[in-house]
Image (spheres, grey):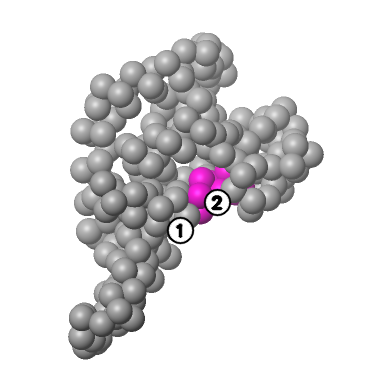
Amino acid sequence: MLDNIFEMVWSIPAVLIAITFHEYWHGKIAYHLGDPTAAEAGRLTLNPLAHLDPLGTLMLLLFRFGWAKPVPVNFNNLNHPKRDMIYVSLAGPIANILTAVIFALVLRLSYYFLGQLTLVRNTFFSNIFFSLLKGWLIFLQTGVVINLALAIFNLLPVPPLDGSKILMGLLPYPQAYQYAKLESYGPIILLILVLSGIIGKVLLPIVFFLFRLLV
């Protein structure tokens, strides 16, 4: 029980970083492409509290798949709405992939330096050090996994995930219009897919394959 609490406490900062970078870069790219909606809503910030969705964050902590509060984007304000929709939608997953790579590099360095340590683990201070080291490694490992999971999960072509916006931008207008009608059913479909374990069985192997590749 205490181990689970310890792991969750060290995982929370990694989850907040993943969520924040994902949503921030959606808004940032939209702003540069002509839409100030996110900035006007106070969402063009690295403050994680502005981006938290309680249920989505809990899902990330428990299942490693979840979501943040979507950054508002008015695609009609974009310079080239159909094309720019793809760029804005890709920004979040790409930010997560790059963040995962950074976490992985720091984790590899941490493993290297850990291999150089020769400490006696029977003193009060060494026990504290090893606890902090264990937490640091949990933080980094979670950072890699969560960012990869968030990127891959959001690329699924299920409304309202980023993948659906990318697909909408690629489809011809008539098909894109019909596809957009599914958006109202998207959250229900997603919840069923996550709770049934289908998403986990399909995507987790991909996430852990990439984790092993990076680390």
Left or right, 39 with respect to 198, comes to right
- The magenta region covers 16-26
Residue at 50% x, 49% y: name it: 16
- Marked residue nearer the N-terminal end (1 or 2): 2
Predominant SS along the magenta part? helix
Check disc 1 and give the amino acid type.
Thr
Quarter where residue 80 is shown:
top right
114 or 207, which lies in front? 114
Q: Residue at x 63, y 53 (%)?
A: 46
Above or below residue 146? Residue 100 is: below
Closer to us: 164 or 120: 120
Q: Residue 194 — which label? A: none
Q: What number is the disc on residue 21? A: 2
Numbered tag placed on residue 99 in the rendering:
1
Helix or strand or loop: what does disc 2 sit on? helix
* Magenta span includes 127: no
Q: Are marks 1 and 2 in contact (CB under 8 Å)?
A: yes
